[in-house]
Amino acid sequence: MIAESFADYSVFWIPGYRFAKCGFIFWLASPRFKGALMLYDKCIRETLKKAEPIIDSVSAQLAKGDLSAVQKELAPATELLQKHGSEMFAKGMTAAAGAAKLAQEELAKANANAAANADKKD
């Protein structure tokens, strides 16, 4: 949603953007396609695994109330995010575009199957 809120200002004029966005959200939420799981497995999991030691350390320091140690710990992570953030954003957008296309293809197949079944009943 964060990426979408920034992207919305620059892509709202593209024909079919809202339809593709709805298709992407459907793909993410659909138990049939398991889009959210696929997106997590291919894009998010590795990033979180790399950040796991930092997350654990920061959580422990926050539990102790040591905010200065948290700031020191997050300084390298901020640099890592700045370095790899655009790469991960590009990966996410590529995956989103592919997912939207896949969702459109699957919806077209479902509509064709429904029409074929309706013709068989008649």
Image (cartoon, grey):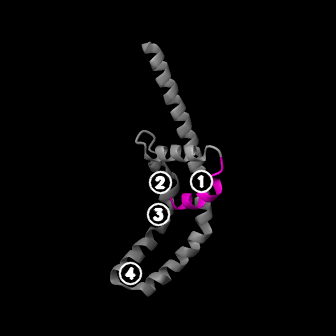
Three-letter amino acid code at the position of disc 3: Lys
Report if the CB atoms under discs 3 and 4 are less than 8 Å apart. Answer: no
Q: Position of residue 80 (x, y in %)?
A: 57, 71
Q: Establish if 108 lies above or below 95.
A: above
Q: To which residue does mark 1 refer?
A: 93
Residue 16 placement: quadrant: top right
Q: Is residue 55 left or right of residue 10?
A: left
Give the mark nearer the N terminus: 2 vs 3: 2
Between circles 1 and 3, the one closer to the viewer is 1
Give the mark nearer the N terminus: 2 vs 1: 2
Q: Is mark 4 on a helix, strand or loop?
A: helix
Residue placed most toward the observer, 72 or 14: 14
Q: Residue at x 48, y 68 (%)?
A: 51
Between circles 2 and 3, the one closer to the viewer is 2
Three-letter amino acid code at the position of disc 1: Met
Distance between the alpha carbons at the discs numbered 4 and 2: 27 Å
Q: Outermost residue toward the front?
A: 13
Residue stretch in magenta = 1-14
Between circles 2 and 1, the one closer to the viewer is 1
Q: Where is residue 75 in the image (x, y as percent from the top left)?
A: 53, 79
Q: Establish if 122 lies above or below 56.
A: above
Q: To which residue does mark 2 refer?
A: 40
